[in-house]
Image (cartoon, grey):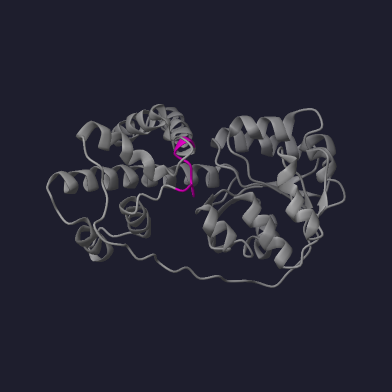
Amino acid sequence: MGSGMASNLLKAGYELTVWNRSVEKCEAFARKGARVADTPADAVRDVDLVMYSLSNDQAVEEVVFSAKGILDGIEEGQIAIDMSTVLPATSSREEEAYAKRGVDFLDAPVFGSKQESADAKLWILAAGNKAIFEKVKPVLEHLGQTVHYFGRNGNAAAMKLVGNLIVALEMEALAEGLVLAQKAGLDLATVMEVVKVADFRSPLLVSNGQNILKRDFSTSFALGLMLKDAGLIEKFAESLESPIPALRVAEKNLASAVALGFGKENASALIKALEKEAGVEVKARVAIKAIPTAVTRKRPTRVGRL
């Protein structure tokens, strides 16, 4: 996800500094003119804006709060944006730590896959000081097709978990539905024709359904990460005493698919746990056409990117 966003910032003409825990991932950006930093603290020096997209709360803890982390290098007047999917409490802790250093902070997680990140077609959520949001919005618009403001810090992180709850349940429904269709002997290509046009249609169902029928589980969003997000949603919902009975079913099947060894495959590999239980494999008899995507761009300004 971060690679796609960094690439689009370079294309837009920003001056870029990059850092990654896997150093080799920085090489392509160095060849394009980006400066490669040795540590997060080094990466945030002498830039206007610091942006990071990390895999989980623990990674945020390590990159932001540890020795030679962001907080060791960032200074008053800079702006930090966390684009990771984390608990709202983690975003609040970041905001408090940055505020002590005179740094403005936004939580700005995104919806979308690696391909949508590469195509600058993400859907971006943002929360924090409204004036700071308006200041950085032109930057965010280089990365996504929409940007939505949610008010105080932590609200965007909360909305990301709300959205991921819906995604997890859609993926569970798709997997259960396709397995049932297979068991019923229906032509799955025709099933997908209905999914494309009926009132329950969604781009998520269509794209993942098509790929399942092609047995294409190449990773846009890893199954293991969806299981991680389900755990975050569970903690968040419990803290608010909000019921999530359907998620618990999806979470069980996600865990089963991960236990079967599919954690690094796309989240649609959730279906493999149900296929094993049902004793079938969901596969189309004919080729399935892909859905095209589009790309948008906005005007450039200057930014430093982590």
Residue 306 seen in this snapshot = no
Residue 202, quarter of the rendered image: bottom left
Residue 272 spot, x, y in % from top left? 32, 38
- Res 117 → quadrant: bottom right
Asked whether 192 or 185 is in front, the reply is 185
Q: Main secondary structure of the magenta part?
A: loop
Q: Position of residue 225 (x, y in %)?
A: 49, 37
- Front-most of 165 and 306? 306
Picture quadrant of residue 291? bottom left
Give residue 264's position: percent from left, percent from top: 49, 38
- Residue 219 inside the magenta-drawn segment: yes
**Frontmost residue, 13 versus 29:** 29
Please give the name of the residue rendered at 12% of the width and 49% of the height, measured from the top-left corner. 185
- Which residues make up the magenta segment? 218-224
Magenta stretch holds residue 167: no
The correct choice, above or below, for 306 with respect to 273 in the image is: below
Residue 260 relative to residue 154: left or right: left
Q: Can see residue 300? A: yes
Q: Position of residue 248 (x, y in %)?
A: 33, 31
107 relative position to 222: left or right? right
Out of 286 and 259, give the one closest to the viewer: 286
Q: What residue do we see at 17% from left, 57% from top? A: 187
